[in-house]
Image: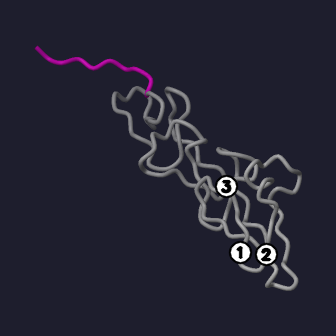
Amino acid sequence: RALERSCAPCPLGTFSSEAGSVQCSRCQVGFANESGMTSCHACPENAVRPASSLGVSAVECECMIGYYAKYGPGERCERCPTGAVCAGGNSTPYPQWGFYGDKGCVESRKCEDWDRFYECIPEEIC
């Protein structure tokens, strides 16, 4: 008896570029946040999705080194601010040698200038 396959929408994290296909492919880059997608969405600007994640949401996309998620996970990543180091991923910027920032603001992201860093003058005061 032959095994019959029926057509069903591809699940989250997968896609099929051919209508009526019974085979779905995992998103290698980007994500598929709806069932039945014919292609994967790209991650936001300056972000990539780790291969170990499922690829079902933009929130899985992480900033590249030298960038940070100013507006939160799943949003475009901004270039690291002057005076800061950005390790990428979901980490917040931190001051490079010779600069300082308000640690409470950076950690909470609730201050208006939470991602602003200031040069130490003289450098030894930092």
Q: Which mark is residue 96?
A: 1
Q: Are marks 1 and 3 in contact (CB under 8 Å)?
A: no
Alpha carbon distance from label 2 to label 1? 6 Å
Q: Is residue 83 left or right of residue 45?
A: right
Read off the magenta span. 1-10
Q: In the structure shown, which secondary structural element does the residue marked by tag 2 occupy?
A: strand
Residue situated in front as seen by the camera: 32 or 64: 64
Marks 1 and 2: in contact by CB < 8 Å? yes
Question: Which amino acid type is marked by label 3?
Answer: Glu
* Numbered mark located on residue 45 in the image: 3
Location of residue 15 with respect to 83 vertically, above or below: above
Q: Residue at x 52, y 32 (%)?
A: 37
How far from the left and from the top, in percent, is residue 65?
Answer: 60, 66
Q: Which percent across, then down, holds residue 54?
A: 45, 39
Instruction: Give the total number of marks visible in the rendering.
Output: 3
Q: Dot 1, crowdedness within 10 Å: few (<14), some or many (≥20)?
A: some
Amino acid identity at mark 1: Gln
Q: Amino acid at mark 2?
A: Phe
Query: Is-magenta flag for residue 105?
Result: no
Task: Tell me which residue sits at (88%, 83%) in the image.
Answer: 121
